[in-house]
Amino acid sequence: MFRPGATLPEKPGWGTHPRVTVPPVATVAALYRHPVKGFTPEPLDRVMLGAGQAFPGDRLRAIEIGPSGFDPAAPAHISKMRFTVLARLPQIAQVRTRWDEATDTLSLTAPGAPGLTVQLGDPVQDRALEVWLTDVLGEEASAPLRLLDGAGHRFMDDPAGAVSVLNLASVRDLESRLGRPVDPLRFRANVWVEGWPAWIENDAAGRAVTLGDAGLTGIKPIVRCAATHVDPATGLSDLDLVPALFDLYGHRWCGLYLSVDTGGAIAVGDRAELT
């Protein structure tokens, strides 16, 4: 089983998770992309995964708070805490964004602010977006904001995270132990799976996963952060989910990172097989 080299101690084995030996067959329950890191998830009916590529339309751009150190000429992974993300600014959940892929325009709305639609990549309109978001965030915009285009680079939390999967049975098990609902959108995953046993993904590193026509390999469980504490509907930090995961299970994991070995189409309702 995967063991991250983190400072957090792990309990032996699966903790409270029973080991499942029968490979389950399940289905894709939902698909999501996040065109701008930290902002609104967008549901999809179908995507085409490419071998060795990241999830289409996901985390293409980010908005830095002050100089992040990102160099477009030599793009590299940078800590998410240098960007406008929920772990740093919970209130950005109240900003609703919608990306039009065909025109590469982004529409934004927020309570008490006029709506805005910008042509991404146009320097004047990119600056207009930065000014608009600075006004919305107010004092929380503690340094100048700047929209960054990865130009092929993806602003992932983890450089291994080409595709992220969330097991809905694990979320339900967490809900039952917490005694309260947990919105799966808190986890900002690309693919939701229905039908796997709870927490089987924790033992999926190196295992083959079939999603629709695409073939993938499990890389490692996703270590969760304070972004999951934020209610995606209200922007309020109302649940200390990361400490709860460790208290209940002995780890901070919920979800699985995967790499794409064989490209192919994935649609809602397709098979999601772990072997």
Image (cartoon, grey):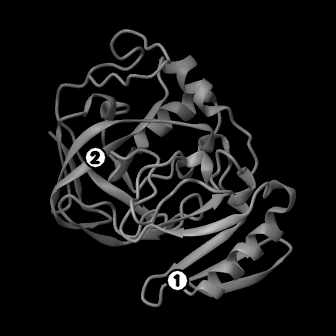
Dot 1 or dot 2: first in sequence order is 1
From the image, tell me which residue sits under label 1.
121
Three-letter amino acid code at the position of disc 1:
Gly
* Residue shown at 30% from the left, 40% from the top: 196
Farthest residue in the bottom direction?
103
Number of the label disc, if any, that sits on residue 258: 2
Q: Residues within 10 Å of mark 2 (few under 14, many from 20)?
A: many
Task: Work out whether 262 lies above or below 119.
Answer: above
Left or right of 142? Residue 17 is: left
Task: Work out whether 35 lies above or below 115.
Answer: above
Left or right of 48? Residue 234 is: right
* Image quadrant containing the C terminus: top left
Q: Position of residue 32 (x, y in %)?
A: 44, 63
Q: Position of residue 160 (x, y in %)?
A: 33, 45
Farthest residue in the top direction?
12
Q: Quadrant of residue 225?
A: top right
Task: Work out whether 247 lies above or below 189.
Answer: above
| Viewer-side residue, 137 vs 235 | 137
| Viewer-side residue, 184 vs 149 | 149
Badge 1 vs badge 2, beta-carbon distance below 8 Å: no
* Residue shown at 18% from the left, 25% from the top: 21
Three-letter amino acid code at the position of disc 2:
Leu
Which element type, helix, strand or loop, lies under badge 2?
Answer: strand
Q: Position of residue 49 (x, y in %)?
A: 24, 65
Left or right of 256? Residue 275 is: left
Q: Position of residue 215 (x, y in %)?
A: 15, 54
Label 1 and label 2: CA atoms lie apart by 30 Å
